[in-house]
Amino acid sequence: MTRWKHHRYTFDLFCISKARINALGACMRQIVLALGVVATLVLTGCASDKGIDESGYSKKPLVDRQGKKLKSADAKRIYDSARDYLMHGQPGQALPLYAEVTARFPFSKYAPQSELETVAAHYQTTDYDQAVDAADRFIKQHPRNPHVDYAYYMRGLSNYARNQPGLLLANPDKRNVVYLKQAFNDFSLLVKNYPDSVYAKDAQLHMIDIRNRVAEFDLRIAEYYQKRRAYVAAARRAEDIVTNYQGSTAVPRALEVMESAYLKLDQPDLAEDTHALLQTSYPNYLLHRDEFYRQQAGDKPNYKLPAIDAPPAPGQPVSDDDSDDDTGANSTTDAATSSTSQPAGNQTSPASGSSEDSGWSLGSGRIGTHDPRRLPEHDTDSP
């Protein structure tokens, strides 16, 4: 009996200790949670916030391009000084002034224009994330502004510029095209809702370029599936290109991938139909395919390529002058450099007889970048 009581007493002690441990653990959790909340509040209060510097109440003195202080200036003078900075290629100095106008004079006629030109200023500083955010705010707050089409246009350009080579200068189209698809949607909204806009034509040119680049991205995936002998996946991906990106430069090669995949899958009827479609729609692709890919590799062209969708025709001889032009047109770097040096809407056409001019180019060219100084005419002087 004594031994049993001893064990019972030990069991009671064990239960009491376990209850105390549980209570102590709950108390410690509450203490840790409280300390975490306090630490978060302290760090949030001490951390620097970029929005504070742009709020218009910065301790830094605001000056115009002539060095005159703008401490007690009115909205018009601050806005004019900010626009002067922007038009002379100093967007970093213009941003605080635009923020000053929107913070101190939010109901003035200069505030909406300042918000709109803030988008262009962020774009000039290559801060494309901030440019997209600023464009989104302007579209939500001023949906009926007469210059809201410019906000859509700049949002599309900013998303388009996001998909650019990084520090390693790798081709971004081989990794991700999400930003390109977002830019396509922005340009599509602009063209659909504001067809008479001065930016609609350049938006359409960007949409064509984006369509070709996204189609090339899917084509690389289809070729990868083909290399891995995943012929069903390759055929489906190539079929999506033909269906969703009609008119793109990747369609002929996608038809080739489909034909090859159908042959491997023992579907001769489908392969024959695909070959007939390729031969009918792009006859010169089959005739001059080797020369095209040789030029794409950077070799000196042997002859000028005829239009890819034209009736079958032999290639034309290449003169000495045209040879240099064609070589440059088939170089990705040269094409990108020549196009980005032109303002939007004023691009120069490719060299006559080049692969780009005849519709053969597989996404090597680039649409000319937008001139950030091409701002909408402000009407702040009107009542």
Image: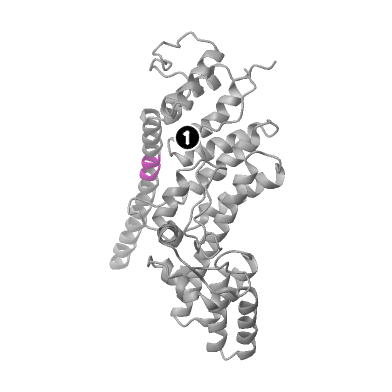
Residue 346: % across, % down: 55, 42
User: Which residue is depicted at the point 61% across and 36% down?
Assistant: 150
Q: Is residue 204 visible?
A: yes
Q: Nearer the viewer, residue 204 or 111?
A: 204
Q: Which residues are magenta?
A: 28-33
Q: Nearer the viewer, residue 143 or 194?
A: 194
Q: Quadrant of residue 241?
A: bottom right
Circle 1: is it few (<14), some (14-19), or many (20+) Cα within 10 Å? Answer: many
Quarter holding the C terminus?
A: top right
Q: Is residue 334 left or right of residue 80?
A: left
The relative height of residue 328 versus residue 282 in the rendered view (above or below) is above
Instruction: Indicate whether residue 71 is drawn in magenta.
Output: no
Residue 245: % across, % down: 61, 64
Q: Is residue 237 visible?
A: no
Residue 260: % across, % down: 53, 83
Instruction: Indicate whether residue 29 is drawn in magenta.
Output: yes
Quarter holding the N terminus?
A: bottom left
Element under label 1? helix
Q: Which residue is mark 1?
A: 122
Residue 35: % across, % down: 36, 37
